[in-house]
Amino acid sequence: MMDAKEKQLFDDLYDRLQKQSFDETDVYALYILLREKVDEKSWLRELGDFVAHRKRDRGRMYTNFKVLAEFDKHTMSLNALAGIEGIQQKELYPEIQKSMVELGKPILEENVLAELLLCTFSLLQFTEFADNRMEYIGKLYITITNREIILCADPADPSQPRFCLGILNNTYTKKLPDDKLLDGWFQFDKKPIRLQRFGRGKLKIYYDGILL
């Protein structure tokens, strides 16, 4: 249950969500408010913990990262990857809707959920994975193509491939110039992208001050 102040904050956040006037700072606050109010095994709790504690040595995404980062296709069976998955919209979206209803609010529109996920990807940029000695073993960053926005994992070991932990359809950027990779593939692994919204318009993606 939320206390009176938390409820006040949540009511204000929900109003911005419903009107689609929110940005990633609002989603950050939403995760902080909800993370201890939901099931410990839920995606909402996992992502809330990731946002709150940006160097992770436990949790669902950490486990998936470790398995994928240590997988060797030459010596290991694909069975080792059974059950390994990134952020699952089919689980996360119903969890969000359930939380809204439990807090006395109508469910959110599908396009609001998509923007929530985009903000989540943005918030997770440059969060780190650490081993049991809290030493760096990898980070998250965003890749954007003309079709998709992808949350990617970058293991510290350069011999290990980068891999995907979440995908969202890209309806947010202008058509990016083609290069030799896929249909316009840009990795934002040196600086984070920024999300901004002006009034109640669509979320815009900026990189280093440039609108994408």
Image (spheres, rainbow, N blue to C red):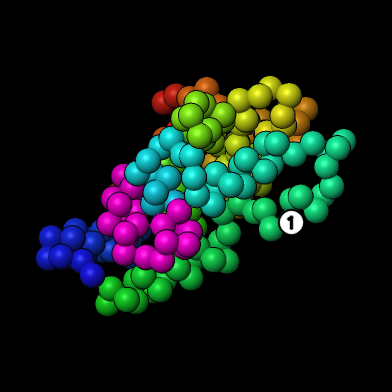
Mark 1 Cα within 10 Å, few/some/many (few <14, many 20+)?
few
Of residues 114 and 41, the one nearer the viewer is: 41
From the viewer's perspective, is 29 left or right of 45? left
For the question of whether residue 42 can be seen, the reply is yes
Of residues 96 and 145, the one nearer the viewer is: 96
Which residues, given as a range, are shown in magenta?
25-46
Task: Provide residue 76's location: percent of width, then percent of height.
Answer: 83, 42
Q: Is residue 26 magenta?
A: yes
Q: Quadrant of the N terminus?
A: bottom left
Of residues 153 and 204, the one nearer the viewer is: 153
Residue drawn 58% across the image and 59% down it: 88
Extreme front residue here? 133
Task: Provide residue 26's location: percent of width, then percent of height.
Answer: 30, 50
User: Can you say whether 210 is above or below 169 in the image?
Assistant: above
Judged by its main secondary structure, the magenta piece is helix
Q: Which residue is mark 1?
A: 82
Residue drawn 51% across the image and 26% down it: 136
- Res 73 → quadrant: top right
Amino acid type, callout 1: Ala
For the question of whether residue 211 can be seen, the reply is no
Task: Provide residue 192's location: percent of width, then percent of height.
Answer: 46, 30
User: Can you say whether 82 is above or below 174 in the image?
Assistant: below
Residue drawn 47% across the image and 62% down it: 41
Task: Provide residue 72's location: percent of width, then percent of height.
Answer: 79, 36
